[in-house]
Image: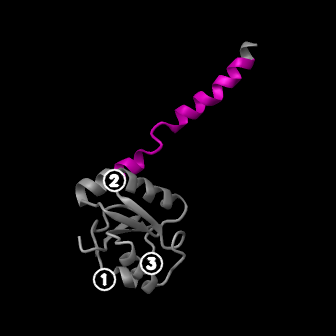
Amino acid sequence: IILFISSFILLPVTSITQGINQGMYIYDLSNILSNQYNIHGNLASNGENSQYYTSEGVAYFLNSQYYGTNLINWKISSDSELENNFIKYKIDYYLLWDNSTANINLLSKYKEVTNGTIAGLKVYAINGR
C-alpha cells in the first residue's frame, strides 16, 4: 500500500521540481530589455513556436501589449503588409529572432536598439522611440 501511495506522490513532486526557474530566461531578458534599452509599449515579432511564447512572456513582464507575429497572427510576409500592420497596431518595437533576414529591407529603415548585444535577438524601434 505504501508503494502504491508513493507512486501517486512521486509524479507531482517531480513535475514541480523540474519546473523551478523554467521562466527565468524570459524574466531576465525582460529586465535587460527594460533596464538597459527602455523597451516598452506595443510589441510584435517574427517568432514562431518557442520564440512566440518567449515574446509573449517578455511583453507580460514589460507590462506591454504583444500583437503577435507577422507569420502566425497576421499571416503576412511582405514588407508592405508588415509595415501596414506596424501602423495599424501602433507597434513600438519589433523583435527579430534567430538572426532572421526576413523583411530585412523594411527593418533596415528602423534603428536596431540592442546593437547586437543579445544573442539570437534584434530589437527594432518602429514608432520612433
The dot on residue 109 is 1
Mark 3: amino acid = Thr
Q: Residue at x 27, y 68 (%)?
A: 113
Q: Nearer the viewer, residue 9 or 128?
A: 128
Q: Residue at x 38, y 76 (%)?
A: 86
Q: Provide the residue span drawn in magenta.
A: 4-30
Q: Residue at x 37, y 65 (%)?
A: 43
Q: Is residue 96 visible?
A: no
Q: Residues within 10 Å of mark 1 (few under 14, many from 20)?
A: few
Secondary element under disc 2, as helix, strand or loop, is loop
Q: Residues within 10 Å of mark 2 (few under 14, many from 20)?
A: few
Tag in front: 2 or 3: 2
Q: Residue at label 3?
A: 101
Q: Is residue 72 above or below residue 55?
A: below
Q: Is residue 53 above or below residue 103?
A: above
Secondary element under disc 3, as helix, strand or loop, is loop
Mark 2: amino acid = Asn
Of the two numbered discs 2 and 3 on the same chain, state the one appearing first in sequence: 2
Q: Is residue 63 above or below residue 86?
A: above
Looking at the picture, how far across and down is residue 5, in whole percent? 71, 18
Mark 1: amino acid = Lys
